[in-house]
Image (cartoon, coloured by chain):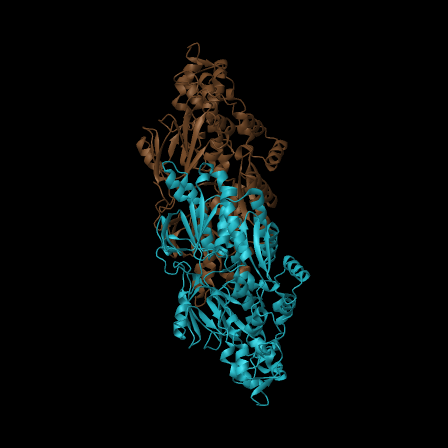
Chain colours: A brown, B cyan
Amino acid sequence: MKIFSYFNKILNDPTYSTKLLVICSISSGGLLAYADSNTNGAKSISVPCQNYETTQKKKVVVLGTGWASTSFLKDLDISSYDVQVVSPRNYFAFTPLLPSVTCGTVEARSIVEPVRNIIKKRNGEIKFWEAECLKIDPDNKKVLCRSNIDENLAGNNEFSLDFDYLVIAIGAQVNTFDTPGVLEHCLFLKEVEDAQRIRRSVIDCFEKAVLPELTEEERKTNLHFVIVGGGPTGVEFAAELHDFIHEDLVKVYPSVKDLVSITLIQSGDHILNTFDERISSFAEQKFQRDGIEVLTGHRVMSVSQRMINMKTKSKGEDVSIPHGMVVWSTGVGTRPVVKDFMEQIGQGNRRVLATDEWLKVKGLEDIYALGDCATVDQKKIMEDISAIFKAADKDNSGTLTIEEFIDVVEDVVIRYPQVELHLKSKHLFEVTDLLKDVDGSDREEIDIEGFKLALSHVDKQTKSLPATAQVAVQQGVYLSSCFNKREKCKSEPEGPRKFRSGGRHDFRPFRYRHLGQFAPLGGEQAAAELPGDWVSMGRSTQWLWYSIYASKQVSWRTRFLVIGDWGRRFIFGRDSSRI
Amino acid sequence: MKIFSYFNKILNDPTYSTKLLVICSISSGGLLAYADSNTNGAKSISVPCQNYETTQKKKVVVLGTGWASTSFLKDLDISSYDVQVVSPRNYFAFTPLLPSVTCGTVEARSIVEPVRNIIKKRNGEIKFWEAECLKIDPDNKKVLCRSNIDENLAGNNEFSLDFDYLVIAIGAQVNTFDTPGVLEHCLFLKEVEDAQRIRRSVIDCFEKAVLPELTEEERKTNLHFVIVGGGPTGVEFAAELHDFIHEDLVKVYPSVKDLVSITLIQSGDHILNTFDERISSFAEQKFQRDGIEVLTGHRVMSVSQRMINMKTKSKGEDVSIPHGMVVWSTGVGTRPVVKDFMEQIGQGNRRVLATDEWLKVKGLEDIYALGDCATVDQKKIMEDISAIFKAADKDNSGTLTIEEFIDVVEDVVIRYPQVELHLKSKHLFEVTDLLKDVDGSDREEIDIEGFKLALSHVDKQTKSLPATAQVAVQQGVYLSSCFNKREKCKSEPEGPRKFRSGGRHDFRPFRYRHLGQFAPLGGEQAAAELPGDWVSMGRSTQWLWYSIYASKQVSWRTRFLVIGDWGRRFIFGRDSSRI
């Protein structure tokens, strides 16, 4: 946990010099826990291989080849497990660069790495099957898979795999919120193929708009690009598209350059609303200067072949605008196979598959879920408050002294991370400050009612994790470290106390550390939210973005290609061939 | 014509030192007339712009964006013409590198250049429409076009264009020779999309072959790659595929590496039969060493989902072999729109559209056809022999003296290039040697019968031009030079005498100069046929191939990308992601 405690330490030190240190460690190939091949953090976690079961290795089936899955596989000790990976995609894609692929700033091929190359480094002990998981059978510990490869080829396409442990990391699909016409008339931005499709569509719109015999109105319609969703992906795509058009396409389609327009539709009041307010308004101002129209407070009601129909949130007015192309980039939805699995295990009425804090699917042993396909259901402290009090009250006096509280506090903070967030939000520096009375003066003892009252607001700080690569990677790293020390921790548990049942948890629960996020805004400008509420915007941030994204590539090949692509773009611009 | 006469001169000098000179000029960015942006030959041909029709520019419509079309556009004097280009492909593709794209040695994007970039250099005076030509109407001088862009976009997809001159350069399509099952079950290698499809299919075959629950036989079937056609494309693809599999794929699919097989099917007795015999047997031996099975003398009768059925030519036996993938690479066929046009102009019973030696479609004024979609119908000298004799016999004596013959000989050689080929094949150095009698002694005079006898074998040397980029480029360069000096040559014709009708042709007829051809054979070896019957084989030839193909790129961007791709392949190998 060296890297975690390192970050922990600097995060709790609010001095400027420390922030500089963060920036330095980030730009010098930092954000160590964020990705990838040289995840030192993970390496310090994994213990030397101690194979307790030499006779029969446990079978691990991993579904998916995204961020969570590959980061799990990267450090898994394969001497203890027989690992099989199943995914319809035989490559890992560096998804944060997808918006760049839509406009050819970076080529699709430059952001993908074959899974077999990644697992080859693990001495060929990991098997990969290019197939889709059709059904998860938790009772019989089987998954049914079907390959989507050309039916013409010889051999059966369906097969099933047995598992001792299953890791579900198949990500999410687009969420249309059942808006009519979206599936038929919108483009999406989740997979590499989506990005390639968008690129061809942009060129199509221009090629169609310049054809002879079109009216000015028709040309304008075809050159109206609409993006639905003002999150980081939508905003970055809008910015990329603006650059593509104004840096490259206007030169090759000069006759229609004044007819182009870009509109970004956001149902909330601001774009980038998960970011710091300063970034949000910086982005809005930049877009205004660039001529990208931002329609906030507009909810899309339906999309048809040539029109997008909205309602304004404030006045409920209907607004319709003609479009040439719509990119739908809002939220994530659950895949059918996960939906089916949720129904089998009694989670049918939930929106997303729930896991406990150890990433184990709720109600099941041996099945884990990471990344966008699942959410960590953080236990509320108020549910366990009596058990905590009882465990802490060693002398059964009915009251807790400060010493008794201090005795359990470490386990409480580990088990309920919302306690720490609560302290931060209240600007308290010591956990024992929680027990102070209303006036802020120390109390000698506290009874159960006072204890409940003191912690009553803590659970408000419980946050669900965002659907980002950063979360998925940290979960993968965490889970592989648990797998690697499974036998060791059975005998020497390292987790917090079980306040209800007694004993200790085998492992510490998963803890997400937010290392910041970027929003490239086009024109060689970016905004970044960095640890410690530090915000950075402008050209230098774009260079920080370049250096971090280059350092985070999964292989030297993709690093070489991505940097080459950036260089190519600087020198020759982006290509407008329709392939 | 400087460059032509330069080559002419060195070709007629059989000393070794001259051949070295040829090699040097080739490797230093040579084969000047072969391609491209710095076609000095063409520049020396075009005369300064003399715009005789300032009031109304003539409308030129060019169909196609391949080699012929782009080389025509590159040097066309747009101050005299109003040019519109129509093609369903908004880019030019460097087709000789298509086999490299099939295996990812070079990326698809690296061999394409947007047409608009090419024509942009011509001051934006050339218009481009991304559309397919549906119908050519020679009577009303119109072409009907339809855009294939997404129907969802606003505006009509059909439009028609008027022309004063039409240049048809839309290339050819694959020729299945009506073999059953080919269209349904084979892959082709004519367009960039075809190459990308092959790449995905190769990966599919491997991914399917490694799936669990397949029999050894099924795995072998899926990994049997068949190429039909032993021409340069088929052979180069077989070589690329072999390298891809043995340099890259066996490392990522180690479990099936011994099950892979490649078969090349050729109906003739040898592969590369348009090349020198030495190259043909060198290739066959190399393929044998590499384990690529070459089935010569096999005619494909039909292709089904998993089998390819053949007949041996010698014994007529039926042979069937199971396959995972078949690439069909034999011959070229006529596109429907050209077929329809041929029927309109009375060429319906011909296989290919015929033009005269000035690339003008036979029987029409103002419509030209270049490249793979047409063939030059060389006039036979024996058809005109009486007219030539009459024109040469100035004193109407009924006999020709040597002097009278010398007087017309230059025009004869220009008008009937087969005369020069005949001389070469007979090892004669002077045209007047033709008139020698049977014993080889000079004759003072010759009568019409003797004249006919002397030239009777000349027409046997008439050859149809191969369907190569080299021919297309030279035709494009030639035609643009004719367009550029159209007005000037009307008053000062530079062509040969019209022996039948008197007067002179405006221009010299098109004359193809074969500058050699390459056959890359894999494993960093290539074979090349160079001017002057010089043959070069092995590693050094592969490097010659690299340097020439790099120098021949249409833009610095593609040159940079192609060289980058080669470097990337050397360092990191080829990518096996299925995108």
Task: Please determine whether, in this image, residue B111 is positioned above or below residue B11.
Answer: above
Task: Please determine whether, in this image, residue A39 is positioned above or below residue A539.
Answer: above
Q: Position of residue A176 (x, y in %)?
A: 37, 45
Q: Nearer the viewer, residue B124 or B374?
A: B374
Task: Please determine whether, in this image, residue A196 is positioned above or below residue B273.
Answer: above
Q: Position of residue B153 (x, y in %)?
A: 41, 59
Question: Can residue A521 be seen at all in this image of the molecule?
Answer: yes
Residue drawn 57% across the image and 64% down it: B514
Q: Position of residue A226 (x, y in %)?
A: 44, 53
Q: Residue furthest right?
A: B17
Q: Nearer the viewer, residue A105 or B63?
A: B63
The number of callouts visible is 0
Q: Nearer the viewer, residue A512 or B139?
A: B139
Task: Please determine whether, in this image, residue B450 is positioned above or below residue B395.
Answer: above
Q: Position of residue A165 (x, y in %)?
A: 40, 28
Question: Can residue B79 be seen at all in this image of the molecule?
Answer: no
Left or right placement of residue B524 versus residue B187 in this view? right
Q: Nearer the viewer, residue A383 or B441?
A: B441
